[in-house]
Image (spheres, grey):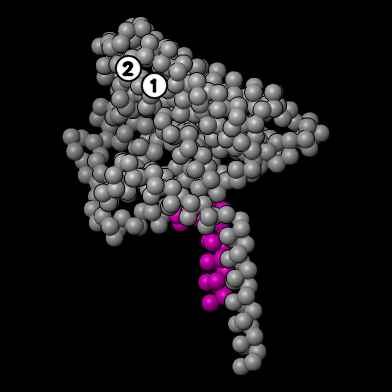
Amino acid sequence: MNGDLKSRLGKIVHYKLFLPLFCLFLVLMVNVITTPDFFHVEIRNGVLYGRPVDIINRASELVILAVGMTLVVAASAGTDISVGAVMAVTAAVTTFFLSGGEISVNEYQFPLFPAILLGIGAGALCGAWNGFLVAKMRIQPMVATLILYTAGRGIAQLITKGQITYIRVDSYQYIGNFLPGVPIPTPVFISIAVVILVQLFVKKTAFGLFVESVGVNKEASKHVGLKSVMIIFATYVFCGVLSGIAGIVASSRIYSADANNIGLNLELDAILAVALGGNSLGGGRFSILGSIIGAYTIQALTTTLYAIGVSADQIPVYKAIVVVIIVSLQSPEFQRYVRKFRKKLEAKKAIGEVTA
Protein backbone atom coordinates (compact mmCIF):
# COMPACT_ATOMS: atom_id res chain seq x y z
CA MET A 1 0.00 0.00 0.00
CA ASN A 2 2.82 2.39 0.96
CA GLY A 3 4.65 1.49 -2.25
CA ASP A 4 1.52 2.22 -4.26
CA LEU A 5 1.08 5.60 -2.59
CA LYS A 6 4.75 6.48 -3.15
CA SER A 7 4.46 5.51 -6.80
CA ARG A 8 1.39 7.71 -7.28
CA LEU A 9 2.98 10.64 -5.45
CA GLY A 10 6.11 10.21 -7.55
CA LYS A 11 4.07 10.38 -10.75
CA ILE A 12 2.29 13.55 -9.56
CA VAL A 13 5.53 15.26 -8.52
CA HIS A 14 7.22 14.44 -11.83
CA TYR A 15 4.24 15.69 -13.86
CA LYS A 16 5.53 18.54 -16.07
CA LEU A 17 3.03 21.11 -14.79
CA PHE A 18 3.26 20.09 -11.12
CA LEU A 19 5.65 22.88 -10.06
CA PRO A 20 3.80 25.71 -11.88
CA LEU A 21 0.49 24.51 -10.42
CA PHE A 22 2.02 24.08 -6.96
CA CYS A 23 3.44 27.63 -7.05
CA LEU A 24 0.04 29.03 -8.06
CA PHE A 25 -1.57 27.01 -5.25
CA LEU A 26 0.92 28.39 -2.71
CA VAL A 27 0.27 32.00 -3.76
CA LEU A 28 -3.49 31.48 -3.48
CA MET A 29 -3.25 29.67 -0.14
CA VAL A 30 -1.38 32.61 1.41
CA ASN A 31 -4.67 34.47 1.13
CA VAL A 32 -6.50 31.93 3.28
CA ILE A 33 -4.34 33.14 6.19
CA THR A 34 -3.82 36.81 5.34
CA THR A 35 -7.13 37.75 3.68
CA PRO A 36 -10.01 35.45 4.73
CA ASP A 37 -12.51 37.09 2.36
CA PHE A 38 -10.11 36.90 -0.62
CA PHE A 39 -12.11 34.15 -2.34
CA HIS A 40 -15.50 35.79 -1.79
CA VAL A 41 -17.35 36.24 -5.11
CA GLU A 42 -20.73 37.92 -5.55
CA ILE A 43 -22.88 39.48 -8.23
CA ARG A 44 -23.10 43.28 -8.21
CA ASN A 45 -25.09 45.20 -10.80
CA GLY A 46 -25.48 42.00 -12.81
CA VAL A 47 -21.75 41.15 -13.04
CA LEU A 48 -19.41 38.90 -11.06
CA TYR A 49 -17.34 40.77 -8.51
CA GLY A 50 -14.48 39.60 -6.29
CA ARG A 51 -10.71 39.16 -6.20
CA PRO A 52 -10.69 35.73 -7.95
CA VAL A 53 -12.68 37.29 -10.81
CA ASP A 54 -10.25 40.22 -10.84
CA ILE A 55 -7.28 37.84 -11.14
CA ILE A 56 -8.78 35.97 -14.09
CA ASN A 57 -9.90 39.20 -15.73
CA ARG A 58 -6.71 41.25 -15.24
CA ALA A 59 -4.50 38.34 -16.31
CA SER A 60 -6.21 38.14 -19.74
CA GLU A 61 -3.74 40.42 -21.58
CA LEU A 62 -0.80 38.71 -19.88
CA VAL A 63 -2.11 35.26 -20.87
CA ILE A 64 -2.36 36.36 -24.52
CA LEU A 65 1.17 37.83 -24.46
CA ALA A 66 2.58 34.75 -22.69
CA VAL A 67 1.27 32.47 -25.47
CA GLY A 68 3.12 34.49 -28.13
CA MET A 69 6.24 34.81 -25.97
CA THR A 70 6.32 31.03 -25.45
CA LEU A 71 6.59 30.37 -29.20
CA VAL A 72 9.24 33.08 -29.65
CA VAL A 73 11.36 31.72 -26.80
CA ALA A 74 10.97 28.12 -28.00
CA ALA A 75 12.02 28.89 -31.59
CA SER A 76 14.71 31.54 -31.15
CA ALA A 77 16.02 30.93 -27.60
CA GLY A 78 15.44 34.64 -27.05
CA THR A 79 12.76 36.99 -25.80
CA ASP A 80 10.66 39.70 -27.44
CA ILE A 81 10.90 42.70 -25.11
CA SER A 82 8.83 44.91 -27.42
CA VAL A 83 5.40 43.33 -26.81
CA GLY A 84 4.26 46.10 -24.42
CA ALA A 85 5.22 48.80 -26.93
CA VAL A 86 3.50 46.85 -29.74
CA MET A 87 0.33 46.88 -27.62
CA ALA A 88 0.57 50.69 -27.49
CA VAL A 89 1.10 50.92 -31.28
CA THR A 90 -1.93 48.68 -31.93
CA ALA A 91 -4.13 50.72 -29.61
CA ALA A 92 -2.96 53.95 -31.29
CA VAL A 93 -3.66 52.66 -34.83
CA THR A 94 -7.09 51.28 -33.91
CA THR A 95 -8.26 54.42 -32.10
CA PHE A 96 -6.80 56.67 -34.83
CA PHE A 97 -9.09 55.09 -37.42
CA LEU A 98 -12.09 54.93 -35.08
CA SER A 99 -11.73 58.61 -34.14
CA GLY A 100 -10.80 59.88 -37.60
CA GLY A 101 -7.75 61.55 -36.07
CA GLU A 102 -9.75 63.45 -33.44
CA ILE A 103 -8.83 63.45 -29.74
CA SER A 104 -12.26 62.34 -28.49
CA VAL A 105 -15.34 61.00 -30.29
CA ASN A 106 -18.79 59.80 -29.25
CA GLU A 107 -19.40 57.84 -32.46
CA TYR A 108 -17.21 55.89 -34.85
CA GLN A 109 -15.63 57.69 -37.79
CA PHE A 110 -14.63 54.32 -39.28
CA PRO A 111 -16.19 50.81 -38.97
CA LEU A 112 -15.16 48.99 -35.77
CA PHE A 113 -14.03 45.59 -37.11
CA PRO A 114 -11.91 46.95 -40.00
CA ALA A 115 -10.24 49.32 -37.50
CA ILE A 116 -9.49 46.39 -35.17
CA LEU A 117 -8.06 44.40 -38.09
CA LEU A 118 -5.87 47.35 -39.08
CA GLY A 119 -4.63 47.60 -35.48
CA ILE A 120 -3.80 43.88 -35.36
CA GLY A 121 -2.17 44.28 -38.78
CA ALA A 122 0.08 46.96 -37.29
CA GLY A 123 1.02 44.48 -34.55
CA ALA A 124 1.79 41.87 -37.23
CA LEU A 125 4.04 44.37 -39.04
CA CYS A 126 5.92 45.06 -35.81
CA GLY A 127 6.33 41.30 -35.34
CA ALA A 128 7.53 40.95 -38.94
CA TRP A 129 10.16 43.65 -38.34
CA ASN A 130 11.41 41.84 -35.23
CA GLY A 131 11.32 38.51 -37.07
CA PHE A 132 13.33 39.91 -39.99
CA LEU A 133 16.05 41.22 -37.67
CA VAL A 134 16.25 37.98 -35.66
CA ALA A 135 15.69 35.31 -38.31
CA LYS A 136 17.24 36.87 -41.42
CA MET A 137 19.77 39.37 -40.05
CA ARG A 138 20.66 37.04 -37.14
CA ILE A 139 20.67 39.79 -34.54
CA GLN A 140 20.37 38.61 -30.95
CA PRO A 141 16.61 38.66 -30.09
CA MET A 142 16.82 40.99 -27.10
CA VAL A 143 18.91 43.49 -29.07
CA ALA A 144 16.65 43.26 -32.14
CA THR A 145 13.45 43.79 -30.18
CA LEU A 146 15.05 46.56 -28.11
CA ILE A 147 14.55 48.80 -31.17
CA LEU A 148 10.75 48.65 -30.96
CA TYR A 149 10.88 48.55 -27.17
CA THR A 150 12.53 51.98 -27.36
CA ALA A 151 10.76 53.42 -30.42
CA GLY A 152 7.33 51.76 -30.21
CA ARG A 153 5.78 54.18 -27.75
CA GLY A 154 7.22 57.10 -29.71
CA ILE A 155 5.53 55.73 -32.85
CA ALA A 156 2.26 55.45 -30.92
CA GLN A 157 2.67 59.05 -29.73
CA LEU A 158 3.20 60.21 -33.32
CA ILE A 159 0.01 58.44 -34.43
CA THR A 160 -2.04 59.98 -31.61
CA LYS A 161 -0.29 63.38 -31.96
CA GLY A 162 0.97 63.15 -28.39
CA GLN A 163 -2.59 63.08 -26.99
CA ILE A 164 -4.71 60.40 -25.35
CA THR A 165 -7.35 59.42 -27.93
CA TYR A 166 -10.77 58.64 -26.38
CA ILE A 167 -13.40 56.41 -28.00
CA ARG A 168 -16.54 57.02 -25.94
CA VAL A 169 -18.69 54.38 -27.64
CA ASP A 170 -20.29 51.54 -25.67
CA SER A 171 -19.59 48.80 -28.23
CA TYR A 172 -15.84 49.55 -28.08
CA GLN A 173 -15.85 49.34 -24.28
CA TYR A 174 -17.54 45.91 -24.39
CA ILE A 175 -14.27 44.34 -25.63
CA GLY A 176 -12.37 45.12 -22.43
CA ASN A 177 -15.24 45.13 -19.94
CA PHE A 178 -18.61 43.33 -19.97
CA LEU A 179 -21.11 42.44 -22.66
CA PRO A 180 -24.71 43.41 -21.75
CA GLY A 181 -26.35 40.65 -19.71
CA VAL A 182 -23.10 38.61 -19.39
CA PRO A 183 -21.68 38.49 -15.83
CA ILE A 184 -18.21 37.31 -16.90
CA PRO A 185 -15.67 39.90 -18.22
CA THR A 186 -15.24 39.83 -22.01
CA PRO A 187 -11.39 39.64 -21.87
CA VAL A 188 -11.73 36.23 -20.20
CA PHE A 189 -13.57 34.88 -23.27
CA ILE A 190 -11.02 36.47 -25.62
CA SER A 191 -8.05 34.95 -23.77
CA ILE A 192 -9.74 31.50 -23.69
CA ALA A 193 -10.44 31.71 -27.43
CA VAL A 194 -6.80 32.66 -28.14
CA VAL A 195 -5.44 29.81 -26.00
CA ILE A 196 -7.75 27.20 -27.58
CA LEU A 197 -6.99 28.31 -31.15
CA VAL A 198 -3.22 28.42 -30.61
CA GLN A 199 -3.18 25.11 -28.74
CA LEU A 200 -5.15 23.43 -31.52
CA PHE A 201 -2.85 24.94 -34.14
CA VAL A 202 0.41 23.78 -32.52
CA LYS A 203 -0.96 20.33 -31.62
CA LYS A 204 -3.01 19.50 -34.73
CA THR A 205 -0.42 20.75 -37.23
CA ALA A 206 3.32 20.15 -37.52
CA PHE A 207 4.10 23.75 -36.56
CA GLY A 208 4.64 22.94 -32.87
CA LEU A 209 7.15 20.21 -33.72
CA PHE A 210 8.91 22.51 -36.19
CA VAL A 211 9.26 25.20 -33.51
CA GLU A 212 10.69 22.72 -31.00
CA SER A 213 13.06 21.25 -33.57
CA VAL A 214 14.43 24.65 -34.62
CA GLY A 215 14.72 25.69 -30.96
CA VAL A 216 16.70 22.57 -30.03
CA ASN A 217 19.10 22.70 -32.99
CA LYS A 218 18.65 25.20 -35.82
CA GLU A 219 21.46 23.81 -37.98
CA ALA A 220 20.31 20.19 -37.68
CA SER A 221 16.77 21.28 -38.58
CA LYS A 222 18.09 22.77 -41.82
CA HIS A 223 19.61 19.42 -42.77
CA VAL A 224 16.24 17.67 -42.47
CA GLY A 225 14.58 20.23 -44.74
CA LEU A 226 13.07 22.67 -42.23
CA LYS A 227 13.24 26.36 -43.14
CA SER A 228 14.40 27.62 -39.76
CA VAL A 229 14.47 31.26 -40.91
CA MET A 230 10.79 31.15 -41.90
CA ILE A 231 9.75 29.30 -38.73
CA ILE A 232 11.49 31.82 -36.44
CA PHE A 233 10.09 34.68 -38.54
CA ALA A 234 6.56 33.19 -38.23
CA THR A 235 6.78 33.00 -34.42
CA TYR A 236 7.66 36.71 -34.19
CA VAL A 237 4.81 37.66 -36.54
CA PHE A 238 2.52 35.47 -34.44
CA CYS A 239 3.74 37.21 -31.27
CA GLY A 240 3.05 40.59 -32.89
CA VAL A 241 -0.52 39.56 -33.75
CA LEU A 242 -1.18 38.39 -30.19
CA SER A 243 0.35 41.59 -28.81
CA GLY A 244 -2.08 43.46 -31.05
CA ILE A 245 -5.05 41.57 -29.63
CA ALA A 246 -3.83 42.27 -26.08
CA GLY A 247 -3.40 45.95 -27.00
CA ILE A 248 -7.00 46.25 -28.19
CA VAL A 249 -8.27 44.63 -24.98
CA ALA A 250 -6.14 47.00 -22.86
CA SER A 251 -7.29 50.02 -24.89
CA SER A 252 -10.95 49.01 -24.59
CA ARG A 253 -10.65 48.73 -20.79
CA ILE A 254 -9.91 52.48 -20.61
CA TYR A 255 -11.76 53.31 -23.89
CA SER A 256 -8.68 55.18 -25.10
CA ALA A 257 -5.12 54.93 -26.43
CA ASP A 258 -2.68 56.00 -23.74
CA ALA A 259 0.67 55.44 -25.46
CA ASN A 260 2.68 55.96 -22.26
CA ASN A 261 0.89 53.38 -20.14
CA ILE A 262 -0.75 50.66 -22.24
CA GLY A 263 1.31 47.48 -21.90
CA LEU A 264 3.89 49.19 -19.67
CA ASN A 265 6.25 46.56 -18.16
CA LEU A 266 4.00 43.71 -19.37
CA GLU A 267 6.88 42.37 -21.49
CA LEU A 268 8.74 41.52 -18.27
CA ASP A 269 5.70 39.76 -16.81
CA ALA A 270 5.25 37.80 -20.07
CA ILE A 271 8.85 36.56 -19.93
CA LEU A 272 8.41 35.64 -16.26
CA ALA A 273 5.17 33.79 -17.08
CA VAL A 274 7.08 31.64 -19.59
CA ALA A 275 9.81 30.92 -17.02
CA LEU A 276 7.36 30.23 -14.19
CA GLY A 277 5.52 27.83 -16.50
CA GLY A 278 8.56 25.56 -16.52
CA ASN A 279 9.69 26.50 -20.03
CA SER A 280 13.39 26.77 -20.80
CA LEU A 281 14.48 30.23 -21.94
CA GLY A 282 17.13 28.43 -23.98
CA GLY A 283 14.54 27.28 -26.53
CA GLY A 284 13.26 23.87 -27.57
CA ARG A 285 10.38 22.05 -25.90
CA PHE A 286 7.60 24.30 -24.65
CA SER A 287 4.31 24.21 -22.78
CA ILE A 288 1.68 26.82 -23.56
CA LEU A 289 -0.42 25.63 -20.61
CA GLY A 290 2.58 26.09 -18.33
CA SER A 291 2.97 29.71 -19.48
CA ILE A 292 -0.74 30.34 -18.87
CA ILE A 293 -0.41 29.03 -15.31
CA GLY A 294 2.65 31.29 -14.92
CA ALA A 295 0.60 34.29 -16.08
CA TYR A 296 -2.15 33.59 -13.55
CA THR A 297 0.47 33.09 -10.82
CA ILE A 298 1.95 36.54 -11.50
CA GLN A 299 -1.47 38.21 -11.48
CA ALA A 300 -2.50 36.30 -8.34
CA LEU A 301 0.70 37.49 -6.66
CA THR A 302 0.02 41.11 -7.64
CA THR A 303 -3.60 40.95 -6.40
CA THR A 304 -2.47 39.25 -3.17
CA LEU A 305 0.06 41.99 -2.44
CA TYR A 306 -2.59 44.66 -2.98
CA ALA A 307 -4.99 42.72 -0.72
CA ILE A 308 -2.52 42.63 2.19
CA GLY A 309 -1.93 46.38 1.93
CA VAL A 310 1.35 46.60 0.02
CA SER A 311 1.59 49.93 -1.81
CA ALA A 312 1.95 50.10 -5.60
CA ASP A 313 5.51 51.46 -5.27
CA GLN A 314 6.63 48.52 -3.13
CA ILE A 315 4.92 45.74 -5.11
CA PRO A 316 7.78 45.24 -7.63
CA VAL A 317 10.21 44.51 -4.76
CA TYR A 318 8.02 41.84 -3.12
CA LYS A 319 7.09 40.46 -6.52
CA ALA A 320 10.74 40.14 -7.53
CA ILE A 321 11.60 38.26 -4.31
CA VAL A 322 8.74 35.77 -4.73
CA VAL A 323 9.47 35.28 -8.44
CA VAL A 324 13.16 34.59 -7.72
CA ILE A 325 12.16 31.95 -5.16
CA ILE A 326 9.64 30.31 -7.54
CA VAL A 327 12.06 30.29 -10.50
CA SER A 328 14.82 28.88 -8.26
CA LEU A 329 12.54 26.06 -7.13
CA GLN A 330 11.96 25.16 -10.78
CA SER A 331 15.60 25.43 -11.86
CA PRO A 332 17.35 22.21 -13.05
CA GLU A 333 20.20 22.83 -10.58
CA PHE A 334 17.85 22.97 -7.58
CA GLN A 335 16.00 19.86 -8.77
CA ARG A 336 19.36 18.08 -9.19
CA TYR A 337 20.25 19.03 -5.62
CA VAL A 338 16.90 17.70 -4.35
CA ARG A 339 17.45 14.38 -6.17
CA LYS A 340 20.94 14.09 -4.68
CA PHE A 341 19.64 14.84 -1.19
CA ARG A 342 16.84 12.28 -1.61
CA LYS A 343 19.34 9.60 -2.71
CA LYS A 344 21.48 10.29 0.36
CA LEU A 345 18.46 9.91 2.63
CA GLU A 346 17.49 6.65 0.93
CA ALA A 347 21.07 5.34 1.24
CA LYS A 348 21.14 6.17 4.98
CA LYS A 349 17.77 4.49 5.44
CA ALA A 350 18.98 1.37 3.61
CA ILE A 351 22.14 1.22 5.78
CA GLY A 352 20.00 1.61 8.92
CA GLU A 353 17.74 -1.27 7.87
CA VAL A 354 20.75 -3.54 7.18
CA THR A 355 22.42 -2.83 10.54
CA ALA A 356 19.09 -3.36 12.31
Name the outermost residue toward the left.
45
Q: Position of residue 238 (x, y in %)?
A: 56, 27
Q: Which residue is mark 1?
A: 259
In the image, which residues are magenta?
1-23
- Against 355, is 289 above or below? above
Q: Which residue is mark 2?
A: 164
Please tell me which of labels 1 and 2 falls first in the chain: 2
Q: Identify the residue at horizontal 31%, vertical 34% (top origin).
A: 185
Task: Please tell me whether the stretch drawn in magenta is mainly helix, strand or loop.
Answer: helix
User: Is mark 1 in CB contact (under 8 Å) with mark 2?
Assistant: yes
Q: Report the residue at 24% width, 41% height from top.
A: 49
Identity, as a three-letter code, of the amino acid under mark 2: Ile
Residue at (30, 25) in percent of width and height: 254
Using residue 226 as the reference point, say whether residue 63 is left or right of it. left
Q: Quadrant of residue 102?
A: top left
Tell me, yes or no, if residue 332 can be seen here. Answer: yes
Three-letter residue code for mark 1: Ala
Q: Residue at x 27, y 10 (%)?
A: 105
Determine which of the numbered discs, if any, sits on residue 29 in the image: none
Disc 1, SS: loop
Q: Position of residue 304 (x, y in %)?
A: 32, 49
Location of residue 35 in the rendering, given as x and y in whole percent from the top left corner: 26, 55
For the question of whether residue 119 can be seen, the reply is no
- In the image shown, does 84 or 7 lie closer to the viewer? 84
The one of 12 and 239 positioned closer to us in this rendering:
239
